[in-house]
Image (spheres, rainbow, N blue to C red):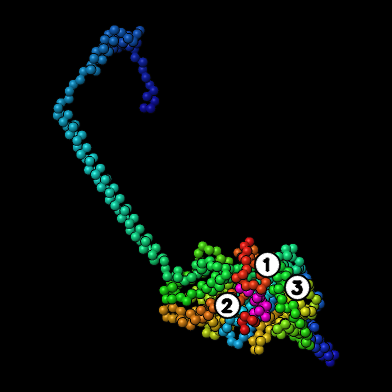
Amino acid sequence: MHQLKDHDIQPPEELFGLVAEQLKINVEGLTSDSHESDLREFERLKDNSVEPPEIVTEKIMAAVHQQTSTITPTVSLLKRSAFRIAATILLLAAVWGIYTLVSTKDNKSPGKDIVTHNDVPIQNENRPISKDSLHDIVIANRKTFRASHKKAYSRNTGSRTHQTGRASAEGYDFAIKDNDLLGSFTNFNYRQLPDFLNEEDSRSIQVKTDHSTSITVSEGMVSMMKKMYKTKRNGQFTWKAKRERKKLLRWKKADANFFDKNPAKNPMDPFDLAEFIF
Amino acid sequence: MQNFFLLTILFSFCRQGICQTPAIDTLPVTNISITYNINITSKNNHGIAETYNGAVKTLYAKNERVKLRFVSLMRSQSIYYNYHAADTNATAIIAKESGKQKYKFRLTPSAWQFYNAKYEDAVTTFENDSISVIGYSCKKAIVTLKDQTQLIVWFFPATRSETLIAAEPMFAGIPGLPMQYELHEGKKMIVYTAKEISFQEIPSAIFQAPMKGYVTKKFMPGKSVKDDIEETE
């Protein structure tokens, strides 16, 4: 069957002439007068129009009106939706604004009342005492103590940069700020005190600093530090702890008064040191 | 019997510390470092003295430079001394290296002399006594100041450099290396005891005085900080 498609038979030649005559096709020329007159007749027909029946017109118009009436409800629906969306957004924005205000108030926590290293203002050089880190030993009240324990008792927060080193004592590693060992010892996290401050008996301990220097904290000093971290059941420092911290602050001031204000006094000189401590 | 006799002689020599004492009579000028422990005995162990008790003083000496470093609970402080300083305004630099407000003083030769004025008239006497400090057989000397306060010094006989003598005028009359020195006030005392001595190479950076973060103050002999004119670098 596939091969038959290419098969064709030529018609007889005399038949071709008969068909041409029937179709009035001029073999020698395509145009003829009769052909042109027929074209003119057809051209006149194009101006001829016939009115459609009225019922058809009505039906068409009705159909058009129906479409437009369906379109109108969709537009109003979109408008109402847009209003609803806008209202929802406004409401959410209002809620967020209120929440932000409320949370900002809460963040002004009482913990900020604890003067950290970063909060101590720059003061007159003639009063170096108030700048020493031990000034940060605040006799914490209930509010401030609890606030300070909500987050880790951070000693190195804030934008101001401080020289921070590391030291270790009896396997307990801690940060030293401003090379101030005493200040660092008095600002441990209450919940993460080193073992030597929790032991019943006081003993001297070795402290190794960054500079490969190892000093000794005496038994008496360890005993004092333990007292400084005593708290009551409610987490507040005991009055003894507060008293010890106040005493330490006085010592710091006395040291600054003697050595900082009198540059000729040398703390590594035995005579000057004896004059101060005895 | 002979072996026993030899052992006895050997033992007696060791008792005298000859076996233990390093064989030096002149201290090297290139690298010396000595670390002293500071022990304080006060009338009670709950006073301010405890903040200095257990402190450490370290001496570093290299050629014409000496650094004295003091580290305690209460404070850290250093003295950078240069025997032949090119800048005469910095014969010595005293730097307080702890606390929020660190500062330093630059001392001229005359200011350095004033700083150590109490030792100018000090008298050094010697006694026939000896102890051993970290294996060094030490002799006894007593430094007496003008106000009659005294410092007992146990020293290892050796020749010290001029730099070392100038850096610690307190030991100017001591013919050797101080290994232990004590100040007594009745039952109270401060004792500096050498715990480590080294002749290893000391990095030059040790002798560099701090620059950044330190307020430079003007040392005015006889005047307190209030009267000083503050300088900034």
Q: Regarding mark 1 in the picture, which secondary structure is present there?
A: strand
Q: Position of residue A139 (x, y in %)?
A: 47, 76
The Cα atoms of the two marked residues, 2 and 1, are separated by 24 Å
Which labelled disc corresponds to residue B166? 3
Q: Nearer the viewer, residue B156 or B127?
A: B127
Marks 3 and 1, the one that precedes in the sequence: 1
Q: Which residue is mark 2?
A: A254
Residue count near mark 3 (Cα–Cα under 10 Å), binned few <14, some 14–19, many ≥20: some
Relative side of B42 to B110, left or right: left
Residue count near mark 1 (Cα–Cα under 10 Å), binned few <14, some 14–19, many ≥20: many
Which labelled disc corresponds to residue B106? 1
Q: Are marks 2 and 1 in contact (CB under 8 Å)?
A: no
Q: Are marks 2 and 3 in contact (CB under 8 Å)?
A: no
Name the subunit of mark 1.
B
**Position of the N terminus of chain A by quadrant:** top left
Residue count near mark 2 (Cα–Cα under 10 Å), binned few <14, some 14–19, many ≥20: some
